[in-house]
Image: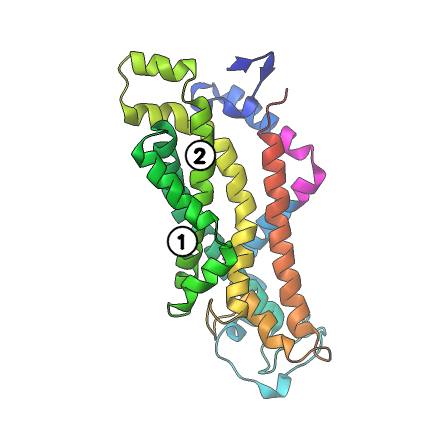
Amino acid sequence: MAEARGKIDITKIDESRLPKRDRIEHLQKIWYKFSLSKVSVVGLAIVILVVLAAIFYKFIVPYPEDVGAVVNFKAANQPPSMAHIMGTDPTGRDIFSRIIYAFRGALKMGIGCIAVVVPIGGILGLISGYWNGTWVSNLIMRLADVFLALPALILVMCVSSIMKPSLTNAMLALCVSWWPYYTRLVNNIVVSTRNEVYIRSAEVLGASNGHILFREILPNTLGPILTKMTLDMGWAIMAGATLSYVGMGEQPPTPSLGGMVSNGVGYLPDQWWLSVFPAFAIMLIVLGFNLTGDGIKDMLSDTE
């Protein structure tokens, strides 16, 4: 158990080396630190509900067939009622069913982007930070600066515009503009820890560069990376909804939150439910990830 300055960071303990009872107590302490913020617990509950709804949507939605290319003009533009709690769209499809299904695309957007940019940005940050001052480091960081100098959403839309509109291409466009943030984050951490005693000791003992990077330095970056990943999930979902809103994201008949908001704008204010409920769903899922990220940040802070 590592101790520094009279404080113990309970989140940096290697659980695999602890007895089962101690591991349980360690997890309980981590949860206690997280649960100190009630709003973060609410955020985590929202995220869990959204994930479960996306996975088990077939058992939740009242009209599973409405997530596809279905037309029922007899039920078109119906306001919220007991039969359709969020109303129906201009082709008679149940909005609640389509929102629940659209959670799948929103989560795919966030998770897919994170799965790509974190390894790429993290590895480049490790390399540039460890060999700080070399031509390799300068090349990586100057390239990152070029992408960081451009507004992220504008860059995403520019990249998306040259590809066929789809969820996969929207994710790729987001990844192009997103990786430098993780490169900069990891680079700063590595530079600040590069001359620590345990790093110098590993070098003196003959440890390889790979061992030092991935076994000594990388674990110290996991806390900030985890926090940023959680916060960025909301940003990625918002960016995906924006692309869908302008027709560059997931394409009909597959429902997307941004696309549903866009399709309902022309019917405001009379058929308000067409845009209001999908917009509220976007707000809810983004809020959930942001509150969860704030809780993780507090949990990983160096407190007693």
From the image, give the main secondary structure of the stretch colored magenta.
Answer: helix
Q: Which segment did they paint magenta?
A: 32-42
Instruction: Tell me where residue 33 sits by quadrant.
Output: top right
In front here: 96 or 122? Answer: 122
Placement of 258 over or under 69, stated as above or below: above
- Judging by the rendered image, the residue that carries numbered circle 2 is 186
Q: Residue at x 51, y 34 (%)?
A: 224
Q: Where is residue 149 shown, x and y percent of the image?
A: 48, 49
Along the line of sight, the residue nearer the viewer: 27 or 198? 198
- Name the secondary structure under disc 2: helix
- The residue at 61%/46% (across/down) is 290
Q: Amino acid at mark 2?
A: Val
What amino acid is at disc 1?
Val
Residue 177 makes an appearance in the image:
yes
Residue 271 percent location from the top left of the image: 70, 78
Instruction: Give the structural element (helix, strand or loop) at label 1.
Output: helix
Q: Say whether residue 33 is left or right of residue 170.
A: right
**Up/down of 246 relative to 50, above or below:** below
Q: Is residue 54 visible?
A: no
**Residue matched to label 1:** 176
Instruction: Indicate the quadrant where residue 260 lies.
Output: bottom right
Q: Is residue 206 left or right of residue 62?
A: left
- Kindly identify the residue that appears in the image at 59 percent across and 87 percent down: 73
Place of residue 158 in the rendered image (x, y in percent of width and height, measured from the top left): 44, 64
Q: Residue furthest bottom?
A: 74
